[in-house]
Amino acid sequence: MHQLKRRHFFQLAGSTAASIGLSQSNLLGYIMRQGDRYGRILAQDTPRKLALLVGINEYDVNFNWRPLRGCVNDVRMQEELLVHRFGFNRNDIVTLTDADATRTNLIKTFEEHLIQQAKPGDVVVFHYSGHGSRVVDPNPLSHDPFNSTFVTIDSPLPNNFGHARVEVNDIMGQTLFLMMLALQTEQVTAVLDSCHSGGGKRGVLTVRSRDGADIFADVHPSAVELETQERLRSQLGLSWEDIRNLREQGIAKGVAIASARRDQLASDASFNGFYAGAFTYLMTQYLWQQTGNESVEATVSNISRITRTFAKDMSRIVQEPEFEENRPSALEDSPIYFIPRQTPSAEAVVLGQKANGNVDIWLGGLSPNSVETVNEAIFTAMDEAGNEQGQLQVISRDGLTAEAQILGSTRSTPRPGLLLQEEIAGVPEDLTLRIGLDPSLGSEMAIAQQALAMLPRLEVKQIETGEVDYLFGRMTADYQTQQSPLQPEIPLVGSIGLFRPGQDVLQGSFREPEESVTDAVNRLQSKFSVLLASRLLKILVNPSTSQVNVVASMRPVNTDGSVATGTALTVRGQRSMATDDFTNSASEPVVLSHECSTRIPADASRLPLGTVVELEVQNNERRDLFISIIVIDAEGNMALLFPNTWDSPTAGALLPARETLKVPDPGRDNFRLRLVEPTGVVEVLVIASRTELRDTLQAIGEIATTRGVSRGSILAADEAFLDVADSLLSDLDRDIRDSSNTRSVSSDSTRGARSFAQEYVSPNTRGVGQDRLAVFSLNFELYDPAQGCLD
């Protein structure tokens, strides 16, 4: 990741110019003007905040590109974040979407809204979501003959693409460089959610790129684009040699955050009823939860880890956001968007009141898995100081906008901008495993539909909806070419099995090509039950909403390895620490050194086969907790690591207050945790509950007893684990409906929310109290050192 500080920029620019014999008069004059301009920044007490947000979905299907679905939602997510978390005035945010996002409009708006209005010390944000591409660069850098571009709504590929020289109406990265250079402020952030290779569909995902010079090297910028660059260059008073020299050093100024590295894919993804860029959603959701002034480096590192994990869960696509910077030394430790914040974390915000007395709310702070559990969820309204203002309940949702009713004696109608924290989630009782029918089934589609429809708690979906957990289909020659070269074993053409939503195989689910559709469905029936159990458990993951003060870690044994801490739990732990007045003592993660360490994030989430690990769970509460630990491997198989005292699972699950659990414990367990195949993404779920979870632990004990599993051993999951997942949800629901528990909750806001749960949460929804439960996930990539990482 290239990081260029402003002080380094001064040195490099001068030395490079001297070494190649350029006249330095224009360049040095420009640098001096920038220094004088920055000298006025600190004199401006109340900087203005300006933003230009661009999102394009409606690319015409008649041309050589695919329409997108999530880019306009990206703009809305970024706008609500800037207004409600970073204090932007909505009148200072300009959005260009679909038909309005032409090349001319984008350039004109950038100049009129940002360049002409921004003064030294102001804050500027530019966001682009849409297709990217590449063109031949007429002023190329030494290492690359092409330049990345933004594909506006009026820049389709000509029909003779691939056969003759063509020009496109794209906006080049060099043009953005010149426009950013023209800004009078240094406090600039560009967020770019697009890519420029690998365009097309991958299962239910759509890649955000249009073919260009990477595919056919005779794609050039339009004459209008080159004229725009010449005009900007002239206004800056720089020569093309000067500009090339500046570009060689990095970005023009400020911070640029890209959704993926240049050789990776950025995609549209479905999130339970709406589409968005995976990166933009995960980034904005993360920022809704941040309460302090985390540095840009730390923020992007955490978002990169989250995005990488999400992308690999959808498919084996690797998507790692990265950033470049060019900031003055006085700004090098600035938080993201250069705006300090000291506001409570939040899952939602009040947008306004409706005619029927209810309110519209924006759910921008909900994690992807929590979106499905928001119907009937109860929120506590908080002012900027964190003071409780009453409770609301969601009664309907459309994307990330919801309608909520005001409960009980809420002091007054919640005003727009009031922050909301989720107290009770609502898990639908009828959750199913959603299986999409892949087009590779061809004429067998009806047979598959009929066979799958016979299975309980399984819902057959058309993949056009995007709302699928897995795809059922046959391996084809084209699908084989899409698989990762590090895939341990690629199924044979004609074999039947399960794909992840991004068209990558679920390992272990395919057999021989001669197998019929009906036989494959029967063979996978037990697998479907385990996958549904996994889905039910994962939907409870709540690091950003839990009020239970608990920390988990994982480290290689007897090495200077890493501690992969549930980062978001630490953030939410600040809310629980305010309640319990206790300091979280989790150690800082360190980087594990091995062959794939060149881009390891701070949590060292890549481990080689054969590594021996141990898990720790710290109970920082003043009360006992009940702990369960489950591991899910790359094939979707589950195993229960803890508790493992099958004759008394309830007592075995107990972790006393202020104590730490180790798994494995040599005094209790008869196993070691050595990481073995299958390679891929492994997920460790840690469940910590203030509630006893009586039925859940009893179900676990009965399974172990029936199988004759010895005390202190790992319990492998089968279809019976679906009963365990159901029991867990029932235990949690029973807990919030028990009025006696309202006397033991940790805060007035939680007590108020729980008192409403009995009346307002319907019988077909299972309530989950965020004050009683912490479920968080430790994800890591298990790889074979002989093959390398999944990059």
Image (cartoon, rainbow, N blue to C red):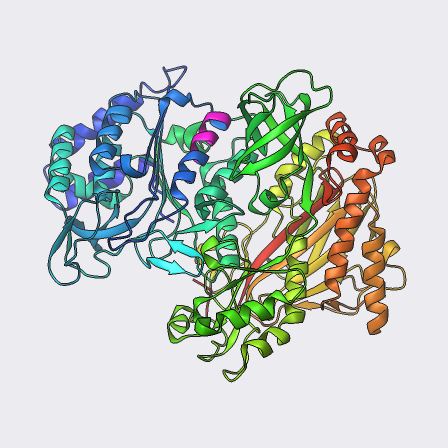
The quadrant where residue 113 appears: top left
Total numbered labels: 0
Residue 174 location (% of width, % of height): 21, 42
**Residue drawn where x is 31% and y is 39% of the image:** 98
Q: Main secondary structure of the magenta part?
A: helix
Q: Is residue 654 magenta?
A: no
Residue 532 location (% of width, % of height): 65, 60
The quadrant where residue 297 appears: top left
**Residue drawn where x is 75% and y is 55% of the image:** 726
Front residue of 639 and 760: 760
Q: Is residue 457 above or below residue 119?
A: below
Question: Is 126 on the left-hand or right-hand side of 462?
Answer: left
Magenta part of the protein: which range?
A: 78-84
Q: Is residue 414 visible?
A: yes
Question: Is 489 on the left-hand or right-hand side of 153?
Answer: right
Front residue of 597 and 740: 740
Q: Is residue 443 above or below residue 767?
A: below
Q: Is residue 187 above or below residue 63?
A: above
